[in-house]
Amino acid sequence: MDIIIKNGKIVDGTGNPWYFGEIGIRKDRISLIKKDIEEEIDLVINAQGKIVCPGFIDAHTHSDLAAITNKTASNYITQGVTTNVIGNCGWTAAPLDPNTVEDLLSLVAPDIKTDLTKLWKGFGTFLDFLDKTRFTINLVPLVGHGTLRIAVMGLEKREPDNIEMHKMKKLVKDSMNAGAFGISAGLEYMPGIFTKPQELIELCKIVASYNGVFTIHTRDEGDLGKEAIDEAIYIAENANISLQISHLKLDGKNNWGKAEQRLHQLEKGRDNGVDVTTDLYPYTYCMTNLHALLPDWLFQEGIENVKKALMDQEIRDKLREYYKNGTSMLAPSTPEDWDNVILVNATSLKYKNKSLLQISREFKIDILDAMHEVINSEGLAMLVVLECMNEDDVHTFAKHPLSMVGSDGGVSDEDNDKIHPRYYGTYPRYLKRFVFENKILRLEEAIRKMTSFPANKFGIKDRGLLKEGFYADITIFDPAKIRDNATLQKPNKFSEGIEYVIINGKIVLDNGKIKRKYPGRVLRKRQP
């Protein structure tokens, strides 16, 4: 036996009550769980007063490229996370086409100057590249609809023709054969905003034939949120595919208090035979790209013409009317709302961590002029943080049996402060607030939502439970000390209370200390 964990309360991930026992690890697997293990062992971890549970599986991340350059994943292992589901919101690092890769990077990673197509093109070659990279956590890949659509037809605002649809279907099939666990879509972003349901139905039918999952950032999360969820369920029902609604939320004050209505839609979908579930993060403020705050019609002539369009007085007047009437993230557009749009990753100090209202006042220009200046300087991929949700709604979503946990973050460099606090604090915050403070969830149920629930949803085999024969992905934490420390002002502060993390049988967090070991694996879906 390589490692034995003793004296802790075992919360096994099933949702069943905790129990005392000992866990034996041999190589990368849990070899034994019993009251007393008497075999010879190399290392004993004393978990007295601690909770021993499966490593947390983050159902929604954007670590596709970050795991390559920030391979220690310190922001995740200090939260107890051992596995990231990557490739969400329609964005993945593959498949790529040399003719359109710049369109993709302009939207999601404008700072990357490397020609990625020299490293990989297809989804399979991307996973092979990851295989050769040493990193700490496990990765569960999805293929992004937005990425494959750009690979085939760039940012064209139209339906694909028959040839283009055939190419997209082939890319999806190739990705699933390479080991993708499903497909993701982001209908609030380009090119998802140009996508009709039938296009996704056809692609999802292929994914469904592999028992894959469909995750979706819905077309709207505010005023048209009901219609957007109906659309997602319609796609899943017609494709006969398992559906995951990403980061369920209610954007805009005029939508607060509608949590039960949204959940009723999910329940109704299940009553009609759709395997729909959802994920959320325990924050009331969200983060998105600046271009998500702009209306769809502004992109009719393509992304390259947006800056030019913003200089047109007629379009400016139309935009003022648009914001005056309220949008999903600015509802309505009062000075207070604009003060709530904070730029978090600006390269210029004159914009960094300032609101659009603050910038407009400092430079004595109106809001649209301020937005135009920022877009010219920082680009449309500029990240903004907004207070967009209500605490009561977050609680209602969190305690519902159809919700699991997803940070909507990614692996991050320890010096990077241009991020949302959820990158560093999601899981300890979820436990502290919902289990130990507000007591809206039993500990065992909260752990289930972080472990076996996402494992079952995505088809991640032999993980998510403390069970003999399963991989040794294990988190040990102190319930008296668990807490998040990341704030909007200091979003890269490590959480506290996670004491040990074991991934594939290797200790990567030892009594709170990061070990900088790299036992993580790219997981591939086992095909039926």
Image (tube, rainbow, N blue to C red):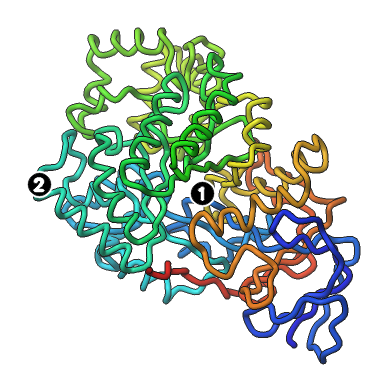
Give the vertical position of 213 relative to 384 (above or below): below
Give the vertical position of 12 relative to 390 (above or below): below
Residue 14 at x, y = what percent?
Answer: 69, 58
- Mark 2 is on which residue type? Asn
Give the vertical position of 323 relative to 465 (above or below): above
Residue that label 1 marks: 60
Quadrant where the N terminus is found in the figure? bottom right
Q: Which is nearer the eye, 98 or 47?
A: 47
Q: What residue is at 55 percent from the left and 58 percent from the top?
A: 456
Q: What residue is at 57 percent from the left and 74 percent from the top?
A: 518
Residue 467 at x, y = what percent?
Answer: 68, 71
Q: What residue is at 82 percent from the left and 42 percent from the top?
A: 436
Regarding mark 1 in the picture, which secondary structure is present there?
A: loop
Q: What residue is at 82 percent from the left and 75 percent from the top?
A: 22
Q: Which is nearer the eye, 326 or 7?
A: 7
Residue that label 2 marks: 162
262 sits left or right of 166 in the view: right
